[in-house]
Image (tube, grey):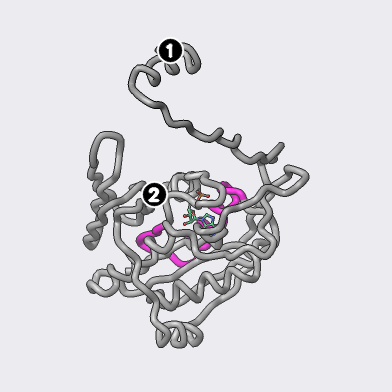
Amino acid sequence: MKVLVAVKRVVDYNVKVRVKADGSDVDIANVKMSMNPFDEIAVEEAVRLKEAGKVSEVVAVSLGVKQCEETLRTALAMGADRAIHVETDAELQPLAVAKLLKAVAEKEQPQLMILGKQAIDDDANQTGQMVAALLGWGQGTFASKVDLAAETVDVTREVDGGLETVKLRLPAVVTTDLRLNEPRYVKLPNIMAAKKKPLDKLTVEALGVDVTPRLKTLKVAEPAKRSAGIKVANAAELVAKLKNEAKVL
Ligand code: AMP
C-alpha cells in the first residue's frame, strides 16, 4: 500500500513574524523556514505505518519554491522513501494546492493521503477537506489515532467535547492533529542517507492545473498591543475596578 504525505514549507514556529511596512503581507525575507509541524506528524504517522508493515511505500509531496527541496529532504530523512516536488514561484492558495495534490494522486494512485490539519502560516485548515472532495474520497480530519486495515481506515477525530471514530473505505484522506504522535528526532546518518533518495520534479503546467489565486489579501495588520496589567491591593479594590472601570459587573 502506498501513502502520499503532503509537506509544506512554512515560517518556523519559533519565529515571531513581522508585518511588512506597507501592510501587504508578512515579511518572510531572511526568516527561518521549516516543515509545517502538523506535516511532521503526518510523515511520522506514514513512516510508523510502514514500520508496522502495513504500508509498502511513503511518498512525500511538496508544492512551491525551489527551497521546498529542503523540506522534502527532511521528510526523506524521517523515513519517506521518495519525494515529489511540484516547483513553482506562484502563490498557492488551498484550492490550488488541493487541485495539484489531486493531480499527483491520480498519477501515483496512493491508497491513503495524509496531510496536516492546517498550515501554521495561512491557518486555512482547508486543503485536506478540499482534496478529499475533489477526489471523491472519504476524509478523516483532526486525527488523533489512525488504524489502517487492508481496505479501510479507522480514524479517531478530535471533535468538540470528545473523540469520534469514523471508518473510511480506502482510498481516503486523513489530516493530523497534535496528539496523533510525537515526530522522531532526525539523526545525522538519516540526513546523509536522505540525500541519495529520489526526489522527482513536476511542474504545474505538466499537471494541467490552473493555480490562479481566488482570494486577494486586502491588508495584514499586527494584533492590537495589550496594555500592561496592574496589581490591586485587595478583593474590594478589584470588585470596584471591575464595576467602575471595566464595567463588567
Ligand atoms: P491549509 O489548508 O493551508 O491549512 O494546509 C493544510 C495541509 O495541506 C498542510 O498541513 C499540508 O499537509 C498541506 N499543504 C498545504 N499547502 C501545501 C504545499 N504548498 N505543499 C504541500 N502540502 C501543502
Q: Amino acid at mark 2?
A: Trp
Mark 1 or 2: in front is 1
Nearest the viewer among 5 and 117 is 117
Q: Please indicate, yes or no, whether residue 103 appears anywhere in the rendered image.
A: no
- At 22% from the left and 57% from the top, the residue drawn is 147
- The image quadrant where one finds the C terminus is top left
Residue 129: x and y in percent read 44, 45
Contact between labelled residues 2 and 1, with CB atoms less than 8 Å apart: no
SS majority, magenta: helix
Residue 212: x and y in percent read 69, 49
Residue 40: x and y in percent read 41, 64
Nearest the viewer among 26 and 129 is 26
Answer above or below: position of 95 versus 79: above
Q: Residues within 10 Å of mark 2 (few under 14, many from 20)?
A: some
Q: How many marks?
A: 2
- At 35% from the left and 56% from the top, the residue drawn is 171
Q: Secondary structure at mark 2?
A: loop
Residue 161: give its label: none
Q: Which residue is mark 1?
A: 243
Answer above or below: position of 41 versus 124: below
